[in-house]
Image (spheres, helix red, strand yellow):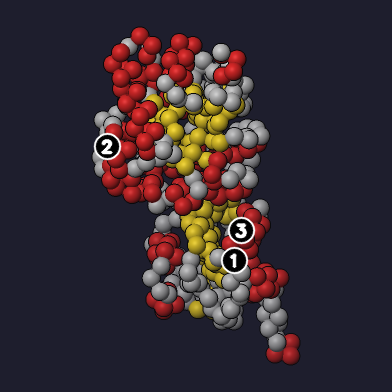
Amino acid sequence: MPRLKSIGWSRTFTHGMMNRLVHLIYCSAAATPFSRDALAKLLSRARAYNEQNGAKLLSRARAYNEQNGITGLLLHAEGTFFQVLEGEEDVVERLFATIARDSRHERITVIVREPIALRDFSDWSMGFAEVSGKDLDHLAGYSDFFTRGESLARLEPSRAKKLLEAFRQGRWREGVTHSVPKPGPDVVPRAAAWPAFTFAFQPIVHAPSGTVFSHEALIRGLAGEPAGQVLGSVPAGREHRFNEQCCVAAIELAARLGLAARLNLNLRASTLEVVPSVIASILAAAARCHVGPERVVLEILESDFIRDASRMAATLREHLASGLSFAIDDFGAGYAGLTVLAEFQPAYVKLDRQLVRGIPGNGPRQAIVRGVIRTCGDLGIELVAEGVEEEAEYRWLEREGIELFQGYWFAAPAFEQLPVWRVERKQEQR
């Protein structure tokens, strides 16, 4: 492993708390390999010492950080940048938006974006790390941050410290991007680890008003191949990273298509555990695309709760403060059943299509659905009937008080489009 080093300025910020403090931690891949000279130049520009009259003149980057109370650390190893930004929330977000546009790196992954009570790097304006040998030792302010570990040891226990340890041990390494082709307007970049993909969108309709309540993003191949074919091409062990990329890409495409309603994304509950960055990545994509988190609904399969419903419920509750909403998908198809609702009360429950199919003439299904309607009503949960393909199904469910519908009776999924829909307003039904 290359020897990691870092450099920082000794200064403590006392910037006013006009906004809540946050830290944002991300990693990214260098667009092209950085030579040692290039790294030294990048570091010199960031630090920009001028010894004239013994004064230290700040570079533009450092001046911005000084003026705006930005603290943090920037690392580089094996083609990966890893940065911690601390400061007031609006300032950090503006700076990160600028960083995200920098052509020197790609594949930006937000690992953590959350409020903090205190800064972890209050005496650092910025740091930089790499490489091997004594390439950068001559620069003023140098400290061997990782090799000796003295500065790291002085940090209080925190999420940032744990992530720095993880990076030092070789995780969160994206590698050099080299020449990744730029995506077209509706095509998701194809990584070597998974197949190319895009999306079709199917509306969830609010029947009383005749309006689209949300659109569900349904994965497709670039030529319209079905979801099963695309998902079957994902290599073993990469499914959860692929799920994360799908959520991000769906937000970006929906925004380009002019999304005005909510957006439903399919997220495996196990992805939340295997890829801790997934919620932060979704929030970052939503912020970039000007989609409020309150407009994003994450659909979790009922069957995902079978193994440990209480633990999964606790995991989901941790993310409610982000503003995202959750839906239990295919409710009634798995084995968790009402136990799910006893542990976790989502904003939405999507009634499984097999319960909807042929319900006007099926007494047992009617009894079950009436029970689910009563339970969801008592718990303040919105119920969505999905897979509605016949007018008679829609009429029966609508008479029972369901207001949200999804299915071919209203609109088929539209490939890379936000489709039109069909629904009669209540006053026209009388």
Q: Is 173 placed above or below 143 here?
A: above
User: If you read the primary sequence from the N terminus, does the residue marked by circle 3 or circle 2 appear first?
Assistant: 3
Q: Which of marks 3 and 2 is in front?
A: 2
Considering the numbered disc 1 on the image, is that residue within a helix, a strand or a loop?
Answer: loop
C-alpha distance separating marks 3 and 2: 40 Å
Quadrant hosting residue 369: top left
Q: Is 255 placed above or below 148 here?
A: above
Mark carried by residue 93: 3
Label 3 with label 2: CB-CB less than 8 Å: no
The residue type indicated by label 3 comes to Glu
Q: Which residue is disc 2 drawn over?
A: 339
Q: Which residue is disc 1 drawn over?
A: 19
The residue type indicated by label 2 comes to Thr
* Image quadrant containing the C terminus: top right
Q: Alpha-carbon neighbours of circle 3 within 10 Å: few (<14), some, or many (≥20)?
A: many
Q: Which of marks 3 and 1 is in front?
A: 1
Q: How many labels does the image show?
A: 3
Q: Does residue 290 appear anywhere in the picture?
A: yes
Q: Alpha-carbon neighbours of circle 1 within 10 Å: few (<14), some, or many (≥20)?
A: few
Residue 193 in percent (x, y) is at 46, 39
Residue 386 in percent (x, y) is at 44, 23
- Depth check, front residue: 298 or 284: 298
- Depth check, front residue: 233 or 17: 17
C-alpha distance separating marks 3 and 1: 12 Å
Residue drawn at x 71%, y 80% as measured from the top left = 57
Q: Alpha-carbon neighbours of circle 2 within 10 Å: few (<14), some, or many (≥20)?
A: some
User: If you read the primary sequence from the N terminus, does the residue marked by circle 3 or circle 1 appear first?
Assistant: 1
Residue farthest toward the right in the current orientation of the protein: 52
85 to the left or right of 378: right
Residue drawn at x 63%, y 38% as measured from the top left = 255
Residue drawn at x 41%, y 57% as measured from the top left = 171
